[in-house]
Image (spheres, rainbow, N blue to C red):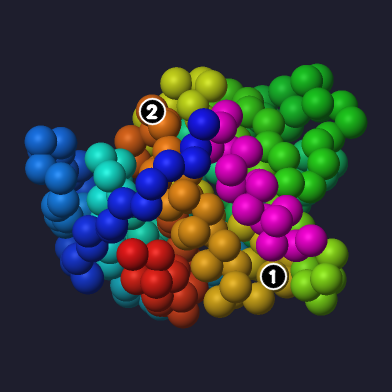
Amino acid sequence: MHACGRRPICRRRRHSSAGFSPPRTDWGSSFRSWTTRADSWPRSDIAETDRPPVGYRQRVTDSALVGQHRLDLSRGDITNERVDAIANAANEALRGGGGVDGAVHRAAGPGLLAELRTRYPHGTPTGTAVATDAYDLPARWVLHAVGPVWRGGNNDEPNLLAAAYRSCLILADELGARSIAFPAISMGIYGYPPPDGARVAVQTVVAYLRGETRVEVVRFVLFSEETYELFAEALAEAG
């Protein structure tokens, strides 16, 4: 179950550095935050509109503790994340697409689409997620989450978006994944308003981490500074 008492979030703004060196974690401390070093920009298969400024060589990271679980915000390319599971912003058909979905498929290689066609020939509904192998990605699994298309806000979009994130976290627990990286689901071509989408994303993850879960690290990997700032504001509000 994931309903439990509210625990505070410890958070430090903001750290930036080049290179990547995962921090050692002292779980004996109730509240602590630290710097996460990150690898440099970017993969060539990301659309130019999704890339950071030319010459940008650093990634800015906020880290927070939710109980004994770590929540990171970072700017980068999710296909480079060395985590147990990468969440993909998929469509209901699970056949690849543009934006993050296209980048994940290109980086993973053709085996990803072949597995989706074999195991999920009818796709999966909005608000759900399915798992596949990660193939050429530096992860063990890809969790394909289907977020809602924004249709004005009166078609259950917030609940469907929250369900997409939650479905990935439940899958991660079922698979035994201890770390997961998320993109900003539905906030691209699906048109979800970025401030609202960021709040739903952060609030859903924080609520899940306050429950019983084996997931130790959740990281939101965001392309633009504007999106990053919205997630940082949502994280501050969640505390």
Q: Confirm whether residue 83 shows in the render.
A: no
Q: Say which residue label 2 marks.
A: 214
Q: Is residue 136 left or right of residue 237?
A: right
Q: Confirm whether residue 35 shows in the render.
A: yes
Query: Would you say the magenta stretch is mainly helix, strand or loop?
Result: helix
- Amino acid beneath label 1: Tyr
Q: Position of residue 124 (x, y in %)?
A: 81, 36
Q: Earlier in the sequence, mark 2 or mark 1?
A: 1
Q: Say which residue label 1 marks.
A: 192
Asked if 80 appears above or below 84 in the picture, the reply is: below
**Residue at the image point whose x is 63% and y is 28% from the top:** 131
Asked if 169 appears above or below 33 in the picture, the reply is: above
Q: Position of residue 76 (x, y in %)?
A: 40, 59
Q: Residues within 10 Å of mark 1 (few under 14, many from 20)?
A: many
- Amino acid beneath label 2: Arg
Disc 2 secondary structure class: loop
Query: Marks 2/1: CA distance?
Result: 30 Å
Q: Give the quadrant of residue 221.
A: bottom left
Q: Position of residue 92 (x, y in %)?
A: 82, 44
Asked if 130 appears above or below 68 in the picture, the reply is: above
**Residue at the image point whose x is 58% and y is 24% from the top:** 133
The one nearer the camera, 178 or 133, is 178
In which quadrant of the rendered image does the C terminus lie?
bottom left
Residue segment shown in magenta = 156-171
Asked if 187 appears above or below 218 in the picture, the reply is: below
Q: Are discs 2 and 1 less than 8 Å apart at CB?
A: no
